Image: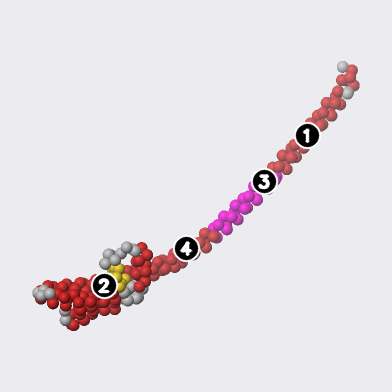
Amino acid sequence: MNKNSNNSNNNYINQITETKCSEHEKEFEYLCFTCNSILCSKCFFNHYKSNKDHDVESIDEIKKNLNNLSNNDYSYLNNSNHNYKTDNYIQNRINYIWTSIKRLSYQYTSLGDKVTEISNHFEKLHQFLIVEEHRLKKPISIDQDTVKEDLDKQLNELKSIINIINFNNNNINKKEVELDDDNQVKSIVEDTTDLYSISTINS
């Protein structure tokens, strides 16, 4: 493979690494071949914790492998009398793949930016709704507190009145009991007097 083709491959890789992760604002450094995702260093750390069996390779290592492929394998193909069509197909396929990766990485970043934009928009709406909620509820809460104070006053007054009534009733009942006791004593005295009257003794 010629020098221009080798530079072309590296350019595709460089275009990927120059694209930044929308979540962490860091350049992409890794490719996961298992889930077809591009990762920055922070993404890679989180990704590795939950996907330790995934096939992940650093972009620098891919560059190195492509250079080796350009310097060794393609040279071997040419030296082994492989026809130009095979060599050209491989080169075209590599170019297509990296072009596709560049397009997808850009699309991924754009979608991430949209997700962030939507999240920020609804976060602002959420904060606005919280402020509005408190604004609308505040006068109602004040009125509610006022009504509760009035209600407590009325209940306390009612309790006081009931206590006064009960107290008076108790006093009245106590007096009635005392009167009954007095009447009983008087009756006993009268009965006793009758018993010891002259008429009773003579009878």
- Residue 56 vs residue 70, the one in the foreground: 70
Q: CA distance from mark 3 to mark 2?
A: 86 Å
Residue type indicated by callout 1: Asp
Residue on which the image places disc 3: 165
Q: Is residue 95 visible?
A: no
Which structural element holds mark 1?
Answer: helix
Report the amino acid beneath label 4: Lys
Image vertical order of residue 96 relative to residue 146, above or below: below
Q: Residues within 10 Å of mark 3 (few under 14, many from 20)?
A: few
Which is nearer the N-term, disc 1 or disc 4?
A: 4
Q: Position of residue 137 (x, y in %)?
A: 47, 63
Q: Label 2's element?
A: helix
What span is colored magenta in the figure?
A: 146-168
Q: Amino acid at mark 3?
A: Ile
Determine the residue positioned at 29% across, 78% down.
18
Residue 105's label in the rendered image is: 2
Residue 188 percent across, percent down from the top left? 82, 28
- The residues tagged by marks 3 and 4 sit, at their Cα atoms, a distance apart of 42 Å
Q: Is residue 155 magenta?
A: yes
- Secondary structure state at the residue bearing disc 3: helix
Q: Nearer the viewer, mark 1 or mark 4?
A: 4
Q: Which mark is residue 137?
A: 4
Closer mark to the observer between disc 2 and disc 1 = 2
The residue positioned 68% from the left and 48% from the top of the image is 164
Q: Is residue 129 left or right of residue 93?
A: right
Kindly identify which residue carries mark 1.
181
